[in-house]
Amino acid sequence: MIHRVKLYARINEGNGTFSRVAVAFHKNGRAIQPAGHVTGFLVRKAGKFEHVGKDLDAAVTRLRQEEALLNGDVIPVQVSAPGQRVRIVDAIAEYKQEIRTLDKSKATVLMYSNALDGFLASCHKTFIDEIERKDILAYIQWMRENLQERVKGGQNQTLRNRLTYLGVFLGKQGVKLAKERNKNGTSDPGLLFYDDLPKVTKKKPKKYDQATIDQLIEVADTDQKDYLMFLLWSGFRDEEVQFLQYTDFNWKNNTVTCHAKPHFGWRPKDAEERTIVLPSKVSQMMKRRMERPQQYANGYRKPAENDLVFPNAEGRPDYHLIKRLHAVAEKAGLNLKGQRAGHMFRKTAGSRVAKKLGLRAAMDFLGHSDVETTALYLAADDLGSKKSRQAFEEMFVEGD
């Protein structure tokens, strides 16, 4: 458990290296400006460092806010009177508190927090009314230099997402982030022109062929096989598998339900719960899994009904669950890193249902809100199928 957060200064040593130095405080609680060439400040929490800008006062405010969150206190925000200028750091802290109060999911809070913390780290302004176009462009550049590309070719999508979250926040402060496409003139409201937004190439969703699936299953151990077979036949999203509990299964009916998990602060996408039918052999495989001891927070034991099905080494939700698939792929001589590997299993499962039962059934199975989404999601491979290739060959032979 984390018992404290700490503030550090990033010092340029002048020889191409940078060091982190803990910020000292006077007895009265006032921070002491560190000696040397300070390039920025960082707050350390949960073993990770977060950039919090170059202003010491703003960095200390952020430290106090994180300490308050840790202790369960109300976050100290500098309240502005009508007409008074609002500091960026206070507006961000207040907004984070607001979305937590509104019972947003942990994932939503994290996405907004990451976007706003990054903007705070890149922006040198103090007040909301000082934000201008060049500050947003500087944030885009900061993201390109500091965000790790998890999926090859997916960085621009990450940038667009974070700009969307930032735009929602700024809109609450009376600042319009992006101009509308048909109102793209210099006098139209908005800091960014439509063409300023990072361009995203829509990628064709892929699915596994049977040979690849067989190759993965063949090298998987018992636990890995449980995971792969559940992915393959449930169509669950990565997060849905992370929070899967044995209570979600109905062993009699061979069904599994994607439930909200308030005790984990998690809800399904679009807050839609759904129940799907599993092949009896897959359902029995999950039931047999309960008979094998696993590591949980209170020791190595057989799972209880309310336990997680695929926990991490501490018996808690495994936020790096996809690494299990990467490990199996590596044993099979395949490299799936940088690909949406788990999503490819979901696509495979959805395609199978659509082929047997139709698009409407696939929509319910995948948890999509409309059939058009399912049609677009599953249509990508149609022209590359064996049947389609054969049809093109026949058209070539037949001519007109």
Image (cartoon, grey):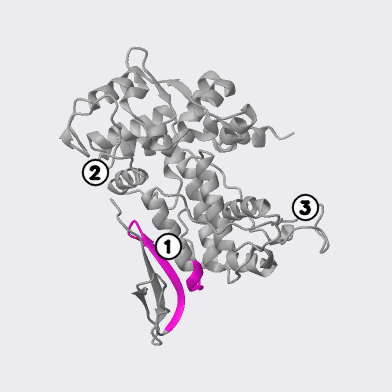
- Image mark for residue 181: 3
Q: Position of residue 179 (x, y in %)?
A: 75, 56
The image quadrant that residue 68 belongs to is bottom left
Residue 367 showing in the rendered view: yes
When the figure is inspected, residue 179 is found, relative to residue 384, above or below; the finding is below
Side of 368 where 107 appears, left or right: left
Write down the region rendered in magenta: 37-58
Q: Position of residue 303 (x, y in %)?
A: 22, 29
Q: Which residue is labeled 2 in the image?
A: 313
Residue 209 showing in the rendered view: no
Q: Which of 389 and 54 is in front in this view?
A: 54
The reply to whether dot 2 and dot 1 touch (C-beta < 8 Å) is: no
Are there few (<14), some (14-19), or many (20+) residues within 10 Å of tag 1?
Answer: many
When the figure is inspected, residue 61 is found, relative to residue 267, above or below; the finding is below
Inspect the magenta stretch and tell me whether residue 146 lies in it.
Answer: no
Amino acid type shown at disc 1: Leu
When the figure is inspected, residue 314 is found, relative to residue 79, above or below; the finding is above
- Image mark for residue 63: 1
Q: Which of 122 and 333 is in front in this view?
A: 122
Are there few (<14), some (14-19), or many (20+) residues within 10 Å of tag 3?
Answer: few
In the structure shown, which secondary structural element does the residue marked by tag 1 occupy? Answer: helix
For the point 40% across and 31% down, the residue is 232
In the structure shown, which secondary structural element does the residue marked by tag 3 occupy? Answer: loop
Inspect the magenta stretch and tell me whether residue 54 lies in it.
Answer: yes
Label 2 and label 3: CA atoms lie apart by 49 Å
N-terminal label among 3 and 1: 1
In the structure shown, which secondary structural element does the residue marked by tag 2 occupy? Answer: loop
Amino acid type shown at disc 2: Ala
For the point 28% across and 30% down, the residue is 307
Residue placed farthest to the front in the image? 28
The image quadrant that residue 222 belongs to is top left
Q: Position of residue 294 (x, y in %)?
A: 20, 35
